[in-house]
Amino acid sequence: MNPSGRRKFIVGAAAAVGTAGIAAGVAWWRSRDAGLAEPPREPPPADFPNALLVPGPSGMFGVVDATQPLAIVAKATSHPLVPGKPGPMLAYEIEQDGVRFLNPVLKTRKGAGFRARFWNALDEESIIHWHGLEVDSNNDGHPHYAIPGGATYDYHFTVTNRAATYWYHAHPHHLTGKQVHLGLAGLLIVEDDEELALQQALDLTFGVNDIPLVIQDKRFDDSGALIYTPDAQDRDHGYLGTDALVNLTPRPYFDAAPRIYRFRILNASNARLLRLAFRHGEGLIDFHLIGSDGGLLDRPRPLQEAFVPAGGRLDVLLDLRAARSPADLTLVSLPFDPMYNESESSAPAGDHAPHATDGSDAPRRSAIPDGAALDLLRIRVRGKAAYQRAVPQTLSFLAPPPATDAAPRVITFDLAGGVWRINGMTYDIKATPIVVKRGATEVWEVRNTARGMPHPVHLHGFQSRVLSREGSPPQQQSLAVDPGGLAATDLGWKDTVTVWPGEIVRIVTDFSHPYLGDQVYMVHCHNLEHADHGMMLNFRIAS
Ligand SMILES: [Cu+2]
């Protein structure tokens, strides 16, 4: 973004804040930036004392124009994950027009060129994977391309994906879990004409009422330092955090006006599956699912809850007029059975830790158990808004799933001798046990063994469609919206799909792309500890 573009961004944000009449927290910070200081109207809620970090014109999660060439540095830095207490973490740093950003929101558009020089300033190897982007393997950030500390890697590709909320994160083999947990992750937002039409129809402004929510559980030691210290149980089940953060903010609140808000939700946890809902009083409030991993659905789907796996995204509209201002809502993860079915005991990992939002200052060494209820974000609806837009009936042209008569390819996720495997194998970075002809359409029948745990299955290089779910556990089955057992979150283009123990999920992928020569991608579990310990396979697109 050039300097005048940035100025426009600030003024636009301040104007929107002014007319919406929200003054406290983040909104106050924004108007202060524009020189229009207003005091907060209301103190922060006692149980959610920290203003949600929202993308702004600089700093952590600031918005960067990714149609311009970028220099991205992975480095150790300091950031107050515990408010007021800066502590060490890893982050991607970008400087653009003299402004410094950490883990910026990279914004670009379909058809634009993408040029970035990645400089690894860590003391170990790393590489950036653009999660969800359909690029050639040189640009995919496959672990094979990891570079040592001090080295650089150049990315150059054309953004061919439709508009959606994608993301980027570290992907060196054996180190992905560590580097992502310690901070190396950010959002990559692609826009196109359908997306811009939606923004206009709903009068959405990014960072004001179009808000990304990056949900991550992170582990802190007693001194409040972010740590990555997996033990044997963490390696089996995934690394769970002591605290649930939204946009790197613990126990956050967000002040909103009574109008439609859009939340672009990314579950960037290492392992934790989330069952998201908006609680209002004793009940849940309806929201509209408008998109998922690979962009907008054809039409909005009214929902009260949705699972989102590690690596997955939900694009959601929440009409806060329905909550009747003033109102306090909470984004929660509802309790669910984490299905650790590989052992005799069904007890979830982690000791019974104090609840993440209990407000106590007692030392909290234990991770929040998998499947536990989480209070993630308080949304305070205040004031009035002259807002009369309605959720559009149609959102985008969604092509039907690619069709094929070919027999499905079976992909089995299982556990043997304490090792998570795909098709009986653990990861060999040089091997390509799956070969797909370029241009072929294939159905992959992903089978998860009954004695196992849920795996978020992620393909690099392609977006897929979910065709059916079979043998789903009741908590998944109850969300089915079609005879094939699909949930609303299965309806659009997908790159990360939960497969529960005992479930068979059929996904279809059109393996066409414009890249000449063989290309090597991977299918892997996005539970990053599973991935780091070998639950990954390469597949080769043979030209
Ligand atoms: Cu897994």
Image (tube, helix red, strand yellow):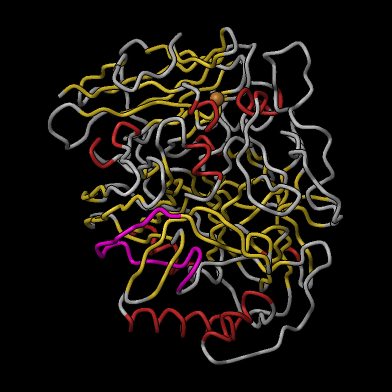
Q: Quadrant of the C terminus?
A: top left
How many circles with numbers are drawn on the protein?
Answer: 0
Q: Is residue 203 visible?
A: no
Q: Is residue 392 magenta?
A: no
Give the residue at x 26% y 17%.
435
Residue 405 placement, left or right of 474: left
Give the residue at x 41% y 19%.
427
User: How far across and how far down the image is residue 533, in percent?
Assistant: 50, 23
Residue 521 placement, left or right of 187: left
Q: Is residue 59 visible?
A: yes
Q: Is residue 68 magenta?
A: yes
Can you say whether 256 is above or below 14 in the image? above
Instruction: Between residue 448 and residue 408, name the one nearer to us.
Output: 448
Residue 181 placement, left or right of 12: right
Residue 242 figure quarter? top right
Residue 341 figure quarter? top right
Give the residue at x 47% y 49%.
184
User: How far across and how far down the image is residue 93, in percent?
Assistant: 41, 61
Point out the residue furthest to the bottom here.
Answer: 36
Can you say whether 106 is above or below 137 in the image? below
User: How far across and how far down the image is residue 517, in percent?
Assistant: 13, 29
Give the residue at x 78% y 49%.
356
Residue 258 figure quarter? bottom right
Instruction: Between residue 284 and residue 400, name the one nearer to us.
Output: 284
Can you say whether 50 is above or below 32 in the image? above
Instruction: Between residue 172 and residue 166, name the one nearer to us.
Output: 172
Instruction: Between residue 220 and residue 326, name the one nearer to us.
Output: 220
Q: Which residues are magenta?
A: 58-75
Q: Quadrant of the N terminus?
A: bottom left
User: How far across and how far down the image is residue 86, in percent?
Assistant: 62, 64
Q: Characterize the magenta stretch by its predominant secondary structure.
A: strand
